[in-house]
Amino acid sequence: MPDIPWLVKCPHCRAMLWLDELQEVQGVNIHDTKTRAGYIKRYERPKVADYFKALKQGKLDASKERYLRMRAWWAGNDKRRDSEHMSRLSTQEEANLQVLEAFMDLSDVEDRIMAAEIKRELGQFNAALDLLMDVPNKAQSQVVARITELAREQDPFVREVKRKEVVANE
């Protein structure tokens, strides 16, 4: 499934825009190549600094704050994933993860797994392992196994989790 962002950056004025807050002012035929070439530019994806800037502006409902904090986390991890050397989280990123963890509903399996990964990246390996002990075996088993392995190795760095291809009728 494609990732449809909620917050984007205007390619013209560089303003951060919540897509759910925009109002359509004029329709454009996107199939008209002259119009598309002359006027339509794709929105840009915010960078990690953009997410932190949006968080500082405050006055966000809980769902938008959670979204910004998640995206800041992922954007920070993206730059590490694409780097040849491992780097620790910045102070700002650590503070973000500590606040983001409070948004996790530990009764939800996905949130519990994310909370464990947050703990692992913060270097709280035993807490990460404790969270994963209550995750049902079939729930995200490869992800849980990888986070468990990394926590036991006391590895706080961004690492790839390879998922097996699911074959139909297996």
Image: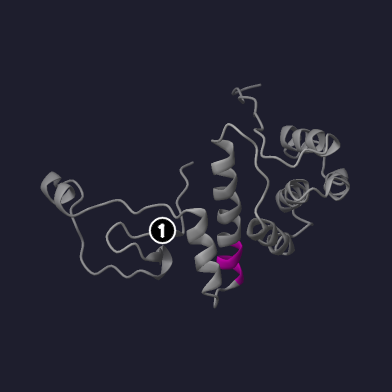
Q: Secondary structure at mark 1?
A: strand
- Is the residue 91 above or below the residue 155 in the image? below
| Figure quadrant of the C terminus | top right
Q: Is residue 42 left or right of residue 73?
A: left
Q: Is residue 71 left or right of residue 143?
A: left
Residue at point 20% right, 66% down?
26
Report which quarter residue 140 is drawn in: top right
Nearest the viewer among 142 and 121 is 121
Residue at point 67% right, 58% down?
91
The scheme the figure's colours follow is one colour
From the top left corner, tell me how far across and down residue 32 is, in percent: 14, 47
Q: Is residue 14 magenta?
A: no
Q: Is residue 11 left or right of residue 36?
A: right
Report which quarter residue 66 is drawn in: bottom right
Task: State the count of labels.
Answer: 1
From the top left corner, tell me how far across and down residue 3 is, in percent: 47, 47
From the top left corner, tell me how far across and down residue 149 is, in percent: 81, 33
Q: Which residue is mark 1?
A: 8
The region drawn magenta spans 62-66
Q: Main secondary structure of the magenta part?
A: helix
Nearest the viewer among 26 and 143 is 143
Q: Is residue 65 magenta?
A: yes
Amino acid residing under circle 1 = Val
